[in-house]
Amino acid sequence: MALWRRFWGGTSKDIAVDLGTANLRIFLEGKGLLIHEPAMVAVNERNSNIVAVGTAAKDMLGKTPPHIITTKPLVKGVISDFEVTERLLKFFLDKIYSENFSLIPRPRIVMTVPLEMTEVERKAVEDAAFAAGAREVYLLEGVIAAALGAGLPVRESTGNLIVNIGAGSTEIAVVSLGGVVNKRTLSLAGDDFTKQIIQYSRDVFNLVIGEKVAEDVKCQIGSTQDWQQPAEFEMRGRYTLTGLPRQVVVQDTQIRESLYKSVHLLVENIKAVIELTPAELVADIYENGLIMTGGGSLLHGLDRTIARETDIPVRVVDDPITVGIRGAGSLLGNVDLINELSLPQAGSRSR
């Protein structure tokens, strides 16, 4: 029976999953990145049925009747709704295998997880993956996955400083010899930038705007440094003084003002991590520079602001949004390396 299981498992294709606050990404061994969709589910509360998943669910945001709830099953990278997370994973895993194979065994799954995750939270992730159809589950810290995706020599005795700005949290970590030497996690991240724009619009313009509009503002004219030419954006929403629709033109300088406190806090925390890092690794960081990953790293001028404030070279990796899943995907098929870099298993199931 054991021999049969080894043979049958050997015919399976490993899968890497990056289950984030904003997006779910799935990488299939031999195929590459197949799924990159919002980690969002629309549920009909009358019968508990799932109405839509991923992009279809995000398109419903703010437009549903009261009995249809659009929800993100992860908050700050941690599972807040186990059942919905399981169904989200199963939906996309079934989609991948129905499109690529007809008869397959259950897959081995490598999942990226946040730093400073408790054992209970890790077990919740493992259980969700097992319930969705995994044969084996390995948990890989997201910053290690990002470092692998960026091509850094994570297994060598060289210090590398990673700043991973996701949607729900920001992770600052010094990586060396395949592990995290020093770290700090902030609840401040891309979603908070968006919320600050929403609050600024209400405070300054008396205009209530939705998440999608604020996200567009952030992506189009959000910055920490001056643009080559002044930029502006037409925001549309509800004017609080009349309750009627209104359009306001916002300038890039105003959005920069709304984000100033968050950017300053981010820089101060990066400095704090460096101050607590062993001197030998700090020397490596000064030589190798700071590596930025995650969607939040795309905020215009943020890399230059951090470089100026820390006096360290800063580089934003190519395609920072998918660097983590690409790094996790690079491990697929190499069980020894997966075992070396993954976290201890929280659940009771054996590998």
Image: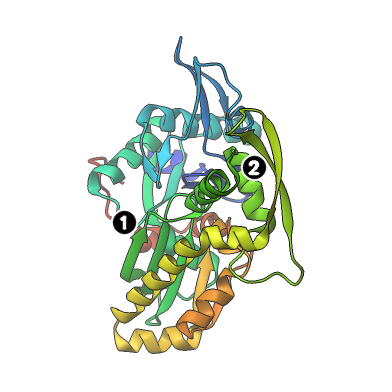
Question: Compared to 103, does 50 lie above or below?
Answer: above
Left or right for 182, reference 90: left
**Residue that appears at 29% across and 84% down:** 278
Q: How many marks?
A: 2
Counting from the top left corner in percent of width and height, residue 122 is at 30, 46
In this picture, residue 339 sits left or right of residue 291: left
Q: Quadrant of the N terminus?
A: top left
Q: In the displayed structure, would residue 130 be above or below residue 222? A: above
Q: Quadrant of residue 140?
A: bottom left
Disc 2 marks a residue whose amino acid type is Val
Q: Which residue is mark 2?
A: 213
The amino acid at mark 1 is Leu
Vertical relation: 164 (above or below) 68: below
10 Å crowding of disc 1: few (<14), some (14-19), many (20+): some
In this rendering, position of residue 85 left or right of residue 41: left
Locate residue 62, reporting x and y percent: 58, 28
Q: CA distance from mark 2 to mark 1?
A: 39 Å
Q: Position of residue 213 (x, y in %)?
A: 64, 42
Q: Is residue 16 visible to us here?
A: no
Vertical position of residue 196 compared to residue 311: above or below = above
Which label lies toward us, 2 or 1? 2
Q: Which mark is residue 343?
A: 1
Work out whether residue 118 or residue 306 is closer to the camera in this orientation and state it.
306
**Are circles 2 and 1 on residues that touch, CB within 8 Å?**
no
Q: Please, which residue is most extreme toward the right here?
A: 229
Residue under the image location 43 percent in, 48 percent down: 111
Q: First in sequence: mark 2 or mark 1?
A: 2
